[in-house]
Amino acid sequence: MLLSDSPLARSRRTAEIIWADRDDDLIPDSDLREIDLYSFQGLLKNEGKERYGVIYRQWQKNAANFSIDGHYPVRELWDRAQNCWERILAHEGKSVLVVAHNAVNQALVASSLGLGTEYFRILLQSNCGASVLDFTPQAGGGPPAVCLNRLNQTPNSPVASGSSAGRKTSKRIILACQGATQNSAEIGVSGMGYAPLNMLGIIQSQKTAELLLDQKVNGILCSPQVAAFDTATTICEVQEAADCLGADCVPRYVEMKKLLELEIDDAFQTKQKSFGEIAQSGWLGSMEYKTLEGLWNQSKAAWQALLNELQDDTSERILVVVGHPGINLALICRCLDLTMDYMSSFHLDDGSISVIDFPDGPKGRGVVRCTNYTAHLGRWSIPITRTMETDEEF
């Protein structure tokens, strides 16, 4: 394992703590330095507003095209990130740990997926947040396939903060993947949408409910399938009981309803693999592609239904959406305005959650706070560093 870090002091110190007593030296890379804002550098927000006015507003509202002192800082950041990937992927080790800063980590994640500068501030990176990218060699050579295994896994709860990229947000969608089912390890079982949760799935559902305990959820939408409905019911029961934990017991009602657009075809539940692994494995034939296309088409209606649910007059609106990882992957792609082909570029595990904030309301762009967060599951989750069956040397 190689550790590559920014040459700046705070990043270097973080790297040293993580690397501890390992024999290999840290490798500094100047392209991993934080974004350079030139004349903006070191200014407080109020100073930037006073001195630069219109230019400062462009930095806030249209950072991708923000220009100062003859430079385009975000574009330069993306160029540096792409240069870094050439060196990172050329390393002989299987795993490379990169320690850097908020903005450059955003650029690394987005550029690895082929996403441009318009995704700056859309895929969040928090202090000590970890993101995991899997690179799979392609038969016949060429660039490796990239899958974002996890985005922004933070030491603190991903639902604790009410801000995204430094902006307050009152509208949030939490995508919760259903727990594991009794048939999830079997292959070719028909009617798997009707399989109930197994013991692992029950524990995962309880852990997810505990994570959301301090959130005042306004509504829970779920797939009609048994595993999703049972997971949603567990979350709902804990939410409704939350206000009875103190001296004054005033149970509150949380609306829970089934959403047909969240139902997923049984074909996607025939293997205990992430949707991305299924899509990349070649398992999808012509008939399966039609099934995939059907899922993608229904996800458009599902995403619009979620946005409609957010359009409430209340100042705060938190929705929990419970479904199979396949439909939740499609919803993440819908949020990011990506095509169906990108569904294989993300990974979600049973029992995971992904958080999407809307600082500009449901009509604005969604900001992805995290994907495939599983820390709340503890020993009941799949480790980030698990050995994959498809591991190969580059």
Image (spheres, grey):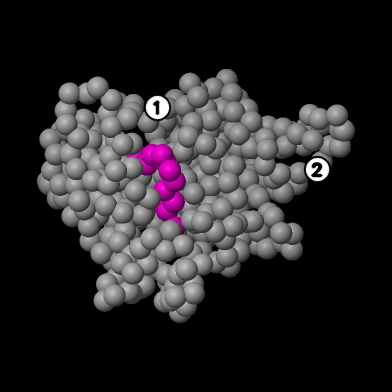
The amino acid pointed to by label 2 is Tyr
- Residue 30: give x, y in percent of width and height: 20, 51
The amino acid pointed to by label 1 is Pro
Circle 2 sits on which residue? 253
Q: For numbered disc 1, what is the local secondary structure? A: loop
Residue at image x 68%, y 32%? 234
Q: For numbered disc 2, what is the local secondary structure? A: loop
Residue 119 visible to an observer of this rendering: no
- Residue 279: give x, y in percent of width and height: 34, 45
Q: Where, by quadrant of the figure, is residue 226 drawn?
A: top right
Main SS of residues in magenta: loop
Circle 1 sits on which residue? 383
Residue at image x 68%, y 63%? 311
Q: Residues within 10 Å of mark 2 (few under 14, many from 20)?
A: some
Where does the C terminus fall, quadrant-wise? Answer: top left
Residue at image x 58%, y 43%? 159
| Circle nearer the N terminus (2, 1) | 2
**Which is more toward the observer, 112 or 315?**
315
Magenta stretch in the rendered image: 122-133
- Residue 51: give x, y in percent of width and height: 44, 75
**Which is more toward the observer, 179 or 335?**
335
Q: CA distance from mark 2 to mark 1?
A: 35 Å
**Which is more toward the observer, 23 or 283?**
23
Q: Are the residues tagged 2 and 1 within 8 Å (C-beta)? A: no
